[in-house]
């Protein structure tokens, strides 16, 4: 079997030989002892936070803008400035300019909405922060989606999930967007560790923010789908060995993987051709020898029946027109999961690209296929919620169709 991925924050559990297999539903959970994470009481409480001043909001927006700009320059520094990347950069700028009307409105919601609780501390490492998107109806606890954003393992950032967070919050679902160290600040084991730490915080503390700890879903997009899948499988391995853990796979009702890659050995050449050069990718993945360890598809093939039994339902979403990560990555992984005995299903979106499902479709307003599919699973056992939100106002269009169509054609993703 593959060696387990680096432990969360380096906290090792008990030896596997000393403990029997722990049945599903009765994990040996240990409370997190970190003093860093925030709580509602420390920040004023959900719904009764100390109102921030305009100066504080502007200062926070400036800090976020600086971070995003810095991430972009880090990306360029590592990718190099050749003809390909100059053209890609120009395409990215044009893409962003065309969709800017929507980005501005989403940004205003992110910085000024009372439903967004930004930068909640969940651990003691750099960038151990998460954003909470809280539904307006706080009369009872609500389902929670722990979301790990994408960004080619280099420019991932929690604010990238703001559009999805807004849409799901409108449907009565809380979203926690987990930030994590990116390359070169960290490598893949650091990213998996950070994601796992964030999930641990959510499982233990989300009730204090109004979330239902018995309805937690894990979701990742692109690189975030890969990172979150690694964290989930690593946790199943630890839990099956009876190791001391800080969150349980049994606390996750379902895993949603959006446009993810799950076999790094098969994707390394594809990424190189797309511009994520082999030398950089291997640095991110801690060398060629680690590719199998951080390939969920390969790890799944080696899981024991006990470890497979711990896994929640796994649902993979992918656009068939995705050139950044081909949809075959999800198709193959679903087949592997099913052969291993896991509960898995695949939802393909015909002709959709890497950004269609996550960016362009939500900006169109109206019924968003991805959101509808996710909501239908989360609210499957709650017909009252389905009926309530079916009659709610349809999300408005944020960008004109002609702008979306042009942006789609020039998108570098």
Image (cartoon, grey):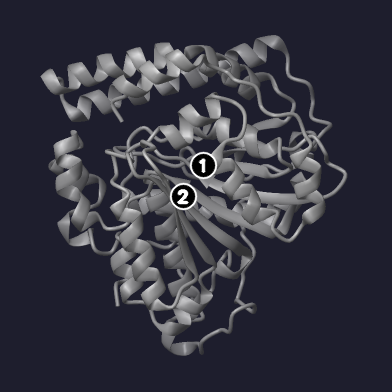
Q: Secondary structure at mark 1?
A: loop
- Tell me whether circle 1 and circle 2 mark residues in contact (CB < 8 Å): yes
From what the image shows, is residue 144 above or below residue 120?
A: below
From what the image shows, is residue 55 above or below residue 367?
A: above
Work out which quarter of the rendered image holds the C terminus and state it.
top left
Task: Give the residue at mark 2.
Answer: 194
Nearest the viewer among 366 and 183 is 366
> Which residue shows up at 69% across the image and 52% down it?
205
Instruction: Give me the disc on residue 226.
Output: none
21 left or right of 79?
A: right
Nearest the viewer among 121 and 371 is 371
> Which residue shows up at 25% across the image and 45% down it?
284
Question: Badge 2: few (under 14), some or many (20 or more) residues near its Cα, within 10 Å?
Answer: many
Work out which quarter of the rendered image holds the N terminus and state it.
bottom left
Q: Secondary structure at mark 2?
A: helix
**Residue farthest along the right direction in this orientation:** 139
- Toward which corner of the image does residue 293 lie, by quadrant? bottom left
Measured as percent of width and height from the top left, residue 86 is found at: 19, 16
Measured as percent of width and height from the top left, residue 58 is found at: 61, 12
Q: Pick whichever of labels 1 and 2 is earlier in the sequence.
A: 1
Q: CA distance from mark 1 to mark 2?
A: 7 Å
108 left or right of 89?
A: right
From what the image shows, is residue 402 above or below residue 358?
A: above
246 left or right of 274?
A: right
308 left or right of 89?
A: right
Nearest the viewer among 173 and 130 is 173
Nearest the viewer among 306 and 359 is 359
Q: Answer yes or no: is residue 234 visible.
A: yes
Task: Give the residue at mark 1.
Answer: 128
Measured as percent of width and height from the top left, residue 183 is found at: 31, 39
């Amino acid at each position: 079997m593959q060696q387990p991925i680096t432990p969360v924050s380096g906290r090792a559990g008990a030896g596997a030989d000393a403990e029997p297999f722990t049945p599903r539903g009765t994990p040996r959970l240990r409370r997190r002892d970190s003093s860093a994470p925030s709580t509602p009481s420390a920040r004023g409480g959900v719904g009764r936070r100390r109102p921030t001043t305009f100066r504080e909001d502007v200062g926070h927006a400036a800090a976020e803008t600086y971070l995003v700009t810095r991430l972009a320059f880090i990306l360029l520094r590592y990718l190099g400035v050749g003809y390909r990347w100059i053209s890609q950069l120009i395409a990215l700028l044009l893409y962003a300019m065309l969709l800017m009307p929507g980005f501005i409105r989403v940004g205003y919601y992110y910085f000024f909405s009372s439903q967004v609780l930004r930068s909640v501390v969940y651990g003691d490492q750099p960038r151990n922060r998460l954003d909470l998107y809280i539904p307006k109806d706080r009369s009872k606890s609500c389902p929670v989606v722990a979301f790990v954003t994408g960004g080619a393992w280099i420019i991932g950032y929690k604010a990238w999930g703001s559009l999805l967070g807004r849409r799901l919050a409108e449907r009565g679902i809380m979203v926690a967007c987990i930030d994590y160290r990116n390359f070169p600040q960290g490598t893949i084991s650091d990213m998996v560790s950070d994601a796992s730490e964030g999930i641990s915080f959510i499982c233990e503390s989300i009730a204090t923010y109004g979330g239902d700890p018995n309805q937690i879903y894990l979701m990742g997009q692109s690189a975030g789908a890969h990172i979150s899948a690694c964290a989930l499988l690593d946790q199943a391995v630890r839990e099956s060995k009876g190791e001391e853990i800080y969150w349980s796979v049994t606390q996750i009702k379902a895993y949603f993987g959006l446009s993810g890659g799950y076999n790094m050995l098969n994707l390394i050449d594809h990424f190189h051709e797309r511009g994520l050069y082999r030398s950089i990718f291997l640095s991110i993945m801690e060398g060629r020898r680690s590719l199998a360890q951080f390939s969920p598809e390969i790890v799944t093939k080696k899981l024991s029946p006990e470890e497979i039994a711990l896994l929640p339902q796994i649902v993979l979403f992918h656009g068939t027109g995705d050139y950044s990560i081909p949809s075959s990555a999800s198709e193959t992984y679903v087949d592997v999961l099913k052969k291993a005995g896991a509960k898995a299903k695949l939802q393909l979106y015909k002709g959709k690209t890497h950004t269609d499902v996550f960016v362009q479709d939500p900006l169109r307003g109206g019924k968003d296929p991805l959101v509808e599919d996710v909501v239908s699973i989360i609210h499957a056992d709650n017909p009252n919620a389905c009926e309530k939100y079916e009659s709610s106002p349809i999300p408005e269009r944020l960008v004109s169709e002609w702008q979306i169509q042009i942006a789609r054609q020039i998108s570098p993703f």
